Amino acid sequence: MMESGPVVLQMRDYAGFEKVGPLGKSLPASNRQMTTQAGDIVLYQGDQIVMFYGTNSWSYTRIGHIDDLTGWEDALGDGDVTVTFSMDNQAG
């Protein structure tokens, strides 16, 4: 999806530990039961991206993880957020 440009999602706060945003289309999933950690980015039900600032146990498809969580909770805020996903096309 990001090959044609950034993907911008309106993400809502859910349960005080994650942000959830609809993709508008389904992607292939390989769900497995896991316990998420802050910084995990997963695909839920094939058509939603979830970014965790807390933990949860559920069946997800892991698609990424943010290692440096400096300012993570402040950036995500208390309510709904707009998140832009893009690819860094720099070689090297």
Image (spheres, helix red, strand yellow):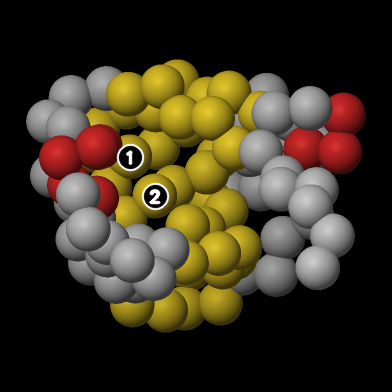
Q: Is 25 situated above or below 49?
A: above
Q: Residue at x 70, y 70 (%)?
A: 30
Give the percent coordinates (x, y) of residue 78.
12, 31
Q: Is 76 situated above or below 37?
A: above
Residue located beneath label 1 in the image: 19
Corner quadrant of residue 40: bottom left
> In this rendering, does residue 50 appear at all?
yes
Residue located beneath label 2 in the image: 51
Name the one closer to the observer, 67 or 79. Answer: 67
Q: Residue at x 15, y 40 (%)?
A: 74
CB of mark 2 within 8 Å of CB of mark 1? yes
Q: In what quadrant of the picture does the C terminus appear?
A: bottom right
> Is residue 84 found left or right of 67 in the rendered image?
right
Give the percent coordinates (x, y) of residue 15.
16, 43
Corner quadrant of residue 29: bottom right
**First reached walking from the N terminus: tag 2 or tag 1:** 1
* Other residues around mark 2 within 10 Å, as few (<14) / some (14–19) / many (≥20): many
